[in-house]
Image (cartoon, rainbow, N blue to C red):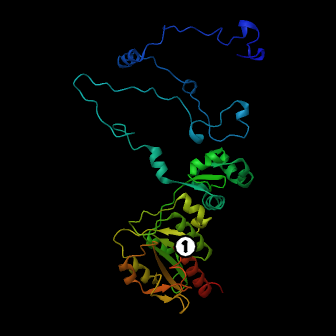
Amino acid sequence: MRSDDDKPRGGDRDNPWRNARPRSDGPRPDKRERERRKAAGETPQRRSDAAATGRGDRDGYKPGAESAGRRPGGGAYGERSGARPERRDYRAPAGETAPRRHAGAVEGAAPRPELQQRQEELRLFGINACLAAFARRPQDLRKAYLTEERIPQFRQLLAWCVQQRLGYRVVENADLAKLTASQHHEGICLEMRREPPLGLAELLARLPPAPAPAVLVLLDGVGNPHNFGALLRSAANFGVAGVVLPPDSSLTLSGAACRVAEGGAEVVALARPHSGEDLLAQLRAAGFVIAATVPRDGVSLFADALPARVAYVFGAEGEGMSAALIAAADRRLTIPGSGAVESLNIAASAAVLFAEHYRQHLAS
């Protein structure tokens, strides 16, 4: 039952269906008949409005566009919209089996460019991480998503997007949580081109020659992105020159690691030696002392002077570093403490070691 206010006014002339065109092809055929028509190629071609005009929505919009009747961006998060191609089913003749294909694969087609693009890009989030990345390498920016409250803080970035014709979207916090898979996005997310790691020789060539002080980090089996990010933050604060990852390590920069690093990921160089390279020999040739960090049975960090050029080796929590790497090290260092806990985690240990080397060699 509805009130008088709900009744259509003006009689039949205000009825929205009064001038509707009747179907010219009669009643809608049932499913079996529609499939038969598809197989016979009788299905009429249809085009969406976007395909008919050759236009789609564009990335980047001004707040309030919705109220003007314009949808802000097409597709998911600013992707261009357009007509969806008609889907046809493969129906083989009797006795013939339809060819099997991998999901998403098209016979004779090159690798999907959007898949390759995802592998080459890094989705950054967090205010300091995004500001540092844009300040250092704005040319690597591909797209930006931010909440309305972050617009004043990122006006320069948005101006760059307009100048370079890059897409950006003003979104809600819930959208950013889905994009970043984190509640700690801080209202900003950038899609940036991923920087490839340096080779070991390239990293060493960037350092001041011996005997100038320098610190490098070797990670053996470390995989936690938050510990990695915290280590990068401390490394940036105390002037560590670079982090070296094993050739077979799956560890890489992620959005979570960069957020925890608070901009440190843009300061500390990452290197990955080529398979077969003698990592320790190259470091020693460049004047570095290899120091393995162990929870016990090592020389106290504060008992002796640290080398000016040192490469600290850190292992994964729990498993620790490999016995062969410990045996190959020039020194074994232990951080002394009360003994109330077994040891510090890798991020805290790294901060203590970096701070002590800075105090001895760089503070003055």
Specify the farthest residue to the bottom.
304
Estimate how packed mark 1 is, as few (under 14), some (14 to 19) or many (20 or more) residues with alpha carbons within 10 Å: some
Specify the farthest residue to the front.
1
Position of 132 relative to 2 (above/below): below
Give the residue at mark 1: 347
Please state if 311 lies on the left or on the right of 32 as rendered.
right
Where's the C terminus, which quadrant?
Answer: bottom right
Q: Position of residue 161 (x, y in %)?
A: 65, 48
Q: Is residue 166 visible?
A: no
Position of 190 relative to 98 (above/below): below
Position of 165 relative to 283 (above/below): above
Q: Position of residue 47 (x, y in %)?
A: 52, 22
Residue type, mark 1 in image: Ala
Query: Which residue is depicted at the point 61% across and 52% down?
Result: 189
Query: Which residue is depicted at the point 56% across and 34% down?
Result: 81
Please state if 242 lies on the left or on the right of 355 as rendered.
left
Q: Nearer the viewer, residue 352 or 3?
A: 3
Q: Nearer the viewer, residue 50 or 257?
A: 257
Query: Which residue is depicted at the point 43% across and 27% down?
Result: 87
Where's the N terminus, which quadrant?
Answer: top right
Q: Position of residue 37 (x, y in %)?
A: 38, 16
Query: Which residue is depicted at the point 51% across and 79% down?
Result: 343
For residue 319, which quarter of the picture?
A: bottom left
Q: Is residue 37 visible?
A: yes
Per the image, label 1 sits on a secondary structure element best described as helix
Q: Position of residue 363 (x, y in %)?
A: 65, 84
Please state if 144 lies on the left or on the right of 335 as rendered.
right
For residue 94, which quarter of the picture?
A: top left
Position of 131 relative to 319 (above/below): above
